[in-house]
Amino acid sequence: MTARRPHRRLPSQAARAAERIRAHPVLAALLLLVLVALPFLVVPALDLAASRLFYAEGTGFPGAARGLQAIRDLGRAVEIAFAAILALPLLVKLAFPESRLLVRPRTTLFVLLTYAIGPGLIVNALFKEHWGRARPRDIVEFGGTLEFTRVWQLAANCPTNCSFASGEAASAFFVVAAAFIVPRGWRRATLAAALLFAAIVSYARLAMGGHFLSDILAAWAIVLVVMVVLRELVLVRLPPAFDRRAEDRVAAAGRALRRGLAALRTHSPRL
């Protein structure tokens, strides 16, 4: 009897692993958060090595003076546009209460909460303002005056707007939320495009000496955890009645706004 070759088991093992991830997405995302930090905790010099690739002795980080700023600006514009596109149908519904809402309220809620909680509250308000990790361009190893600290280590080297975690990497990765809401046939392409966008924006921040590689990977993982949790709570668990009630309330608000504007015009004909 011929023994099975080990490599034939790989597809089934990969399938089982994928099934476990689908069954426990939140735990998988939390595990990823730990795994991306582990190498940098064990060997902190990995962060220095990654940043040193973009550092030039005597001139600092030349990438900061090149076209990478344009990538940074484009990234911000894309992120804002993505959130605005999802919020726009609500504004249209307010202006025209009898029209049909083109995007499910839960979809808009998922996207806006992901942005507010992930990049906004956790990364920018909590970590960047309180973790105190100095940026690569400011540490002694790269011509600065501040001390290098490893990822996830609380420090007092930076008073505000610090290196950990990367706010712009978090905001860029937020665009991955699109893969959770597009039709199934578009998901792989959307995910690939969103990840490429996040990688380009994050690369710019790394090359400019604004963040360590671990800051970027941690930001991605944090936002992914938020996405997965909100997907379960908002996209999956909210009852169908939520969308109907939300649309009715937006329509009611639109009609009230219309009445208020009509009354205002009556009392102020010049408006």
Image: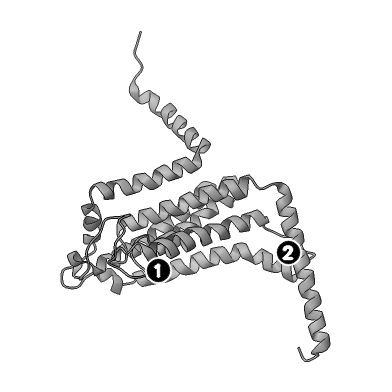
The quadrant of the image that shows the N terminus is: top left
Residue 165 in view in this figure: yes
Q: Residue drawn 79% across and 71% down? A: 256
- The residue indicated by pointer 1 is 72
> Amino acid under label 2?
Val
Task: Residue at 22% x, 58% y: name it.
Answer: 48
- Dividing the image into 4 quarters, which one contains the C terminus? bottom right
Location of residue 140 in the rendering, given as x and y in whole percent from the top left corner: 18, 67
The answer for how far apart the CA atoms under marks 2 and 1 are is 35 Å
- Binning the other alpha carbons within 10 Å of mark 1 as few (below 14), some (14 to 19) or many (20 upward) gives some
Q: Residues within 10 Å of mark 2 (few under 14, many from 20)?
A: many
**Residue 7 at x, y percent in the picture:** 35, 25
Q: Nearer the viewer, residue 158 or 108?
A: 158
Secondary structure, mark 1, is helix
Residue type, numbered disc 1: Arg
Residue at the right extreme of this rendering:
266
Above or below residue 7? Residue 151 is below
- Decide which of 133, 141 is in the foreground and name it: 133
Q: Give SS at disc 2.
A: helix
Instruction: Tell me which colouring the rendered structure shows.
Output: one colour
Quick check: 64 above or below 236? below
Whole-percent x, y for residue 58 in the image: 16, 72
Residue ID at (34%, 20%) = 5
Q: Report the side of 132 relative to 121 (left or right).
A: left
Task: Give the residue displayed 39% in from the left and 24% down from the top.
Answer: 9
Q: Is residue 230 above or below residue 116?
A: above
Q: Residue pushed farthest left?
A: 57
Residue marked by disc 2: 250
Q: In the image, 110: left or right of 92?
A: left
**In the displayed structure image, the side of residue 54 where residue 242 appears, left or right:** right
For residue 255, which quarter of the picture?
bottom right
Residue 201 visible, this angle: no
